[in-house]
Image (cartoon, grey):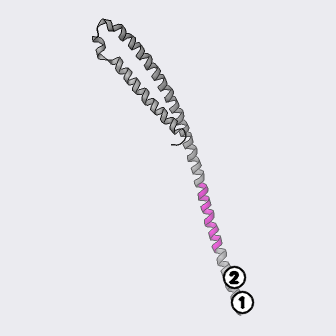
Amino acid sequence: GGEGGPILEEHLDLAEHILKRVTHAVGVLEDPEQQKRPMVLAEYTEDMVGLVCQDLRQWLEQLASLLSLYHVHLLDTGNKCSRLEQLLKEETKKAAAGEEERKKAVQRHDVLNEKWQEEKMRRRVEALL
């Protein structure tokens, strides 16, 4: 959710794919059978190791780029969060001040209303006398 949600999800999927590729490449390089192969295959195997290492370098470079993007995204998110926290504090203060003003206004109204009622009674009494 939020800004960049789908893009971030894409990045996470790509990172997962890259890590699977890296794990696979490392598995190929670790192949214990490599030592037991006949000499005819040795040259082929060395070429394959070269290709797998190139592949690994590419995947790891992509992963480094993604991690850099994540870092920027996390910093942005942190900054947004800080701004929102500050805004919330300010709005909370305003709301508290508004509530205080409202209470005072209600008290003033009650006092004025009471005086007005007293004045009405006093006039009624005068009218009767």
* Residue type at tag 1: Glu
Residue 63: x and y in percent read 47, 26
Q: Quadrant of the C terminus?
A: bottom right
Task: State the residue position of label 1.
Answer: 126
Kind of element beneath mark 2: helix
Magenta extent: 93-110
- The image quarter containing residue 16 is top left
Residue drawn 64% across and 78% down? 114
Q: Residue pushed farthest bottom?
A: 129
* Residue type at tag 2: Glu
Label placed on residue 29: none
**In terms of sequence position, does the residue under pointer 2 or pointer 1 come before the other?**
2
Mostly what secondary structure, the magenta segment? helix
Label placed on residue 119: 2
- The image quarter containing residue 25 is top left
Residue drawn 37% across and 21% down? 26
Q: Is residue 85 magenta?
A: no
Residue 95: x and y in percent read 59, 57
